[in-house]
Amino acid sequence: MSLSAKDKARVRNFWDKVSHQIDAIGSGALSRMIAVYPQTKTYFAHWSDLGPDSPDIKRHGKVILGGVSDAIEKIDDLKGGLINLSELHAFQLRVDPANFKLLTHNILVMLAIYYPNEFTPEVHRSMDKFFSRLALALAEKYR
């Protein structure tokens, strides 16, 4: 699923609108993923609190969405631009790459909740395509 010039423009324009809320969107997406997909808790077993108001969830959600912001800046070369993150997740953190899809799905849910009017079907499609490409780029070093 490639990103057209229109998709890239939609992603950038939508992200410009939502970027001031990335802390809340990130922590919401991460806590939702852990609640809906409890098998993902294993990656956060070192945290004492996995609730939605957990400082660890809030901090890491901000880190994750900061990474999404960085990926949007590198949208023309996601694989090359995210190679260090791919290596980190593959070799040090050893995250199952299936979890990238779970997390990006939850980010989409949070975007729809926070921005129901701006999250049009066209924006949804473009963001979904972007997140699919992002997940593939993050899984690059697993191959």
Image (cartoon, rainbow, N blue to C red):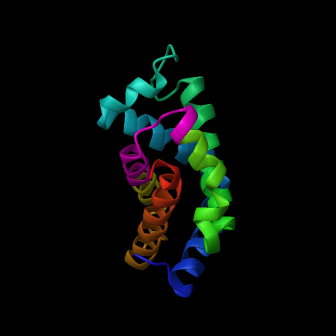
70 to 106, vertically: above or below: below
Q: Count every numbered label the image shows and give the total.
A: 0
Q: Position of residue 106 (x, y in %)?
A: 40, 49
Q: Position of residue 80 (x, y in %)?
A: 64, 63
Q: Which residue reaches farthest front?
A: 143
Instruction: Mark yes or no: residue 35 visible.
Output: yes
User: Residue 74's quadrant in the figure?
Assistant: bottom right
Q: Which residue reaches farthest top?
A: 48
Quarter of the image for the N terminus: give it: bottom left
Does 92 sit left or right of 41 as displayed? right
87 to 134, vertically: above or below: above
Does 26 sit left or right of 63 as displayed? left
Q: Residue at x 57, y 32 (%)?
A: 92
Q: Residue at x 43, y 48 (%)?
A: 100
51 to 23, vertically: above or below: above
Is 97 in the magenta?
Answer: yes
The secondary structure that most of the magenta stretch takes on is helix
Q: Nearer the viewer, residue 94 or 56?
A: 94
Write the start and end of the magenta stretch as one range.
90-106
11 to 132, vertically: above or below: below
Q: Position of residue 43 (x, y in %)?
A: 45, 27
Q: Residue at x 45, y 18 (%)?
A: 45
Q: Position of residue 117 (x, y in %)?
A: 45, 69
User: Residue 17's quadrant in the figure?
Assistant: bottom right
Does 127 sit left or right of 23 as displayed? left
Is 13 in the magenta?
Answer: no
Instruction: Mark yes or no: residue 17 visible.
Output: no
Q: Residue at x 69, y 66 (%)?
A: 73
